[in-house]
Image (spheres, rainbow, N blue to C red):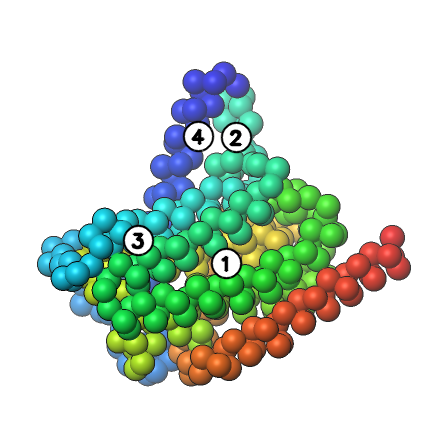
Amino acid sequence: MSTSLLLLVSLIKSVIILGILLTGFAYATLLERKLVAGMQVRYGPNRVGPWGMLQPLADGIKLAFKEDTTPRGADRFVYALAPLISVVMALSAFAVVPIGDSVNIFGQEIPLELANVNVGLLYVLGATALGVYGIVLAGWSSNNKYSLLGSVRSSAQMISYELSLGLSLVGVLMITGSLQLPDIVKAQTPVWFIFLQPLGFIIYFISAIAETNRAPFDLPEAETELVAGYHTEYSGMKFAMFFMAEYINMITVSSIATTLFLGGWHGPFNLISGPWWFFLKVFILMCIYVWLRATLPRLRYDRLMNFGWRVLLPAALLNVVLTAGGILIFS
């Protein structure tokens, strides 16, 4: 494939990925509101468009025209930069996620991911971890003590649960011997890794919920304590960017769970494959996210930290030891 054609294909795939993520973010908010309404036996959005399907568009228009304020005493440059960092890192993380096998278009093999790098998993972990800088800078630059406390909470929470999240993936890497996400998917053709690494999957999913600041780990926002935390002073499109980053990160961590533990684009028993299986699995994991939010109360902060360091981290280390022992025994 020539360089110019390669650049064109990469540009087209970038536009498609951005379209999928932005549309997914918009309708993930509607999905959450509808599911929570059903669980709480009340109506969800049902006025804007048929069955409320245009509610995300109405929300976007409202935020776009909402007054954009900057608090007195804030660092204006950092205050404006912080939400942009969160969004860019959230969008960038999806660049190496494969949603399907290669397809042949006009005689050219086109992989269904933007880039297949040899350290794809490390790239995803690095991009998602950098997103916390947006939160930290937002809290610091807002000239608000509640916002600063929320951002400090987020950074401490990220450090605590990033260790467990990273270790939960070591077992998968030990089995496959590769950091390339397509290789990991193809290694699950006999059996999905959730059956070989059930403890690793549970640790990963819990840590991912904490990393994305979702209930019951939404301590950085904690309305009853911090008046919404790090984004208290944000409004309009700047607030929308934080909202966008949160839901795109949810999609990303669900996609990584699908790729590493649930067979990626392979269907049950690997009889049928295709991108629709990938999106179906991500959809189910997103529904579990919403279910947990509607079910579990917010943890106390000391209990959140104790759970991360005293339960999840030792369990992740145990999973590494058990995986190593299993490889030695059965290899």
Q: Is residue 97 visible?
A: yes
Q: Amino acid at mark 1?
A: Ser
**Residue 95 position within the rendered picture, expressed as x and y whole percent measured from the top left:** 47, 42
Location of mark 4 (residue)? 10
Secondary structure state at the residue bearing disc 1:
helix
Task: Please give the label number shown on residue 110.
Answer: 2
Mark 1 — residue? 254
Where on the picture, by quarter, is residue 62? Answer: bottom left
Earlier sequence position, callout 4 versus callout 3: 4
User: Secondary structure beneath disc 2?
Assistant: strand
Is residue 106 positioned above or below 307 on the image?
above
**Label 4, label 3: how far apart the Cα atoms are:** 27 Å
Question: Cα distance, mark 1 to mark 3?
Answer: 24 Å
Q: Earlier in the sequence, mark 2 or mark 3?
A: 3
Residue at 40% x, 51% y: name it.
90
Q: What amino acid is at disc 3?
A: Ala
Q: Residues within 10 Å of mark 3 (few under 14, many from 20)?
A: many
